[in-house]
Image (spheres, rainbow, N blue to C red):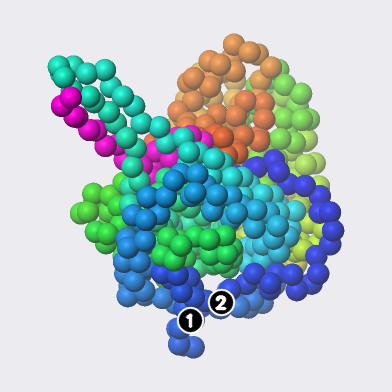
Amino acid sequence: MRNGMTQPLETTLAPDDWTELRYEQAYCAGNWLGSRPNERIDIQNPSTGEVIGSVPCLGIEEARDAIIAARAAQPAWQGLLPRQRGDVLMRWHDLLMRHRRQLAALMTKEQGKPLADAIGEIEYGASFIRWFAEEASRLYGEVIPSHLSARRLFVQREALGVVGLITPWNFPSAMLARKAAAALAAGCSAVAVPSVLTPFSALALAALGEKAGLPPGIFSVLTGNPAVLGGELCRNDGVRGISFTGSTEVGRLLMAQCAPSIKRLSLELGGHAPFIVFSDVDVESAAKAAAEAKYQTGGQDCLAANRIFVHRSIYQGFLDAFVRAAKSIRVGDGFDQATDMGPLINRQTLAKSEAHVADAVGKGARLLTGGRRLPQGELFYEPTVLADVTSEMKIMHEETFGPVAAITAFDEEAEVLAAANNTEYGLVAYVFTSDLSRSHRVSDALEYGMVAVNTVKLTGAPIPFGGIKQSGIGREGSRYGLDEFTTLKYVCTAV
Ligand code: NAD
């Protein structure tokens, strides 16, 4: 998720700004819940390893309470005028924007990303709340020209009901804001389960939502084991839809868990983005763009450029420029204003990057830079560049979710398209070319939900974000985003 909204900090933060919106209780059915001391989960700063607080480890009982409250509160929420729901959402947006520095600091503490990126994420998340606050009034139905005599036929869009929102740690605020805003605008109530690695950003959203006037039960944020809480959301008959962002593997599991109760599913899953550079581009700027698409959020981004294909005629020049860009990235603590890239989220993510590098080098790839841990802390890894990768290497088939760039050369357009599409993923593809016809031809041929041509900035509230194939189903943001949380009712009236 590159949002293009990152801006320089206007002011420096006070050292304890991040504690202002740190809630160490879960928000369930309109109540802030604690738990017994031995049932709490410590939350760590991935940059330092420091424990920055703890949250309750809730279980199935609390999940059921939240679902019951959500069901009870939903009809009245749906019964409000769309403008009234929009007004509450707009107040929520305003509160996020007013507290964006504190929210960003909290995010940097629990997620590790640079503060400027965290501010960008808060603004990005808030933009969805504003967008859907406005879209609430545009839930149009349709009058159908009748095929029956003396009948009036129409279709209206109604809220799905209670929905479960399960979100990851890489964009701990925006992913939840994007889902919740659409669900609530549509008139649904929601029970959210954020990643247990980054629950504070979600709890802060809940606190500001409460302040904005979301009625009790309309938006709960539960903390605890996501398999337990998410499992209950999937199995419970009271929940009518699940919206999940995370890996394809977990998406598949949730889909199976939802099968018995036939729930609506919206899944934003893994990506394995190809980044294709044709020979007719400015090599330096294409390499810079590719490095940005690779290393943003330390590569822990479903839109990360995972496979970089460069035309052989410019390959060496591209490699040189890309390595320069990788080497210029300053890795460090997110609170240091000089930092471009923070730590990885945990040891598994770091281990996956290391495994991909070892596998690729073992099979003949050239390590041009990086490939080592950094002394800044346990979870810091160098921006890494591998050249001459081949399809036998794991990195060409699996999402790395780390700062390792895999670059290879190609000769023909047809060859690179076949390679780019040779994956079960289909989230985003990037193309760099100055040939207009080719840009259209290649965009058409790429089997992806989103294609970015000569840019790496493509997301935002007005666009339908989502993938095809095993990258997911459904779209978030845009006017299509409400579809995930509404259902059609057809009414036939004899007149
Ligand atoms: P993951 O699927 O293991 O975890 C994602 C979240 O799912 C977790 O934070 C947790 O809250 C929840 N979860 C995990 N196991 C669960 C279970 N059994 N039941 C219910 N919920 C469960 O993924 P990850 O490795 O932590 O995150 C990275 C993955 O997420 C990558 O594959 C990435 O591409 C994907 N992602 C996709 C998007 C998108 O919009 N397409 C955005 C961000 C991340």
Against 175, residue 206 (above or below) is: below
Q: Amino acid at mark 2?
A: Glu
Q: Position of residue 475 (x, y in %)?
A: 45, 38
Most extreme residue toward the front is: 495
Q: Nearer the viewer, residue 50 or 209?
A: 209
Residue drawn at the location 44% of the way across and 46% of the way down: 81
Q: Is residue 150 magenta?
A: no
Tell me which residue sits at (72%, 30%) in the image. Answer: 286
Secondary structure, mark 1, is loop
> Which quarter shows the C terminus?
top left
Which residue is identified by label 1?
A: 34
Labels 2 and 1: the sequence-earlier one: 2
Q: Is residue 491 magenta?
A: yes
For the residue carrying disc 1, how many other residues have a C-alpha within 10 Å: few (<14), some (14-19), or many (20+)? some
Cα distance in 3D space between marks 2 and 1 = 8 Å
Query: Is residue 389 visible to the viewer in this orientation of the structure?
Result: no
Whether residue 38 sits left or right of residue 363 in the image: it is left
Give the camera-side residue of 153 and 346.
153
Task: Please give the range of residues in magenta.
Answer: 478-495
User: Mark 2 near ligand 1 (CB under 8 Å)?
Assistant: no
Q: Residue placed farthest to the top in the image?
A: 437
Residue under the image location 56 percent in, 35 percent down: 462
Q: Is residue 23 visible?
A: yes
Residue 175: give x, y in percent of width and height.
53, 52
Label 2 crowd (10 A; few <14 / some 14-19 / many >=20)? many
Q: Kindly indicate the quadrant of the structure image that contains residue 451.
A: top right
Say which element carries label 2: loop
**Tag on residue 460?**
none
Mark 2 vs 1: CB contact within 8 A: yes
Q: Circle 2 sits on which residue?
A: 24
* Residue 331 pos. (x, y %): 76, 57
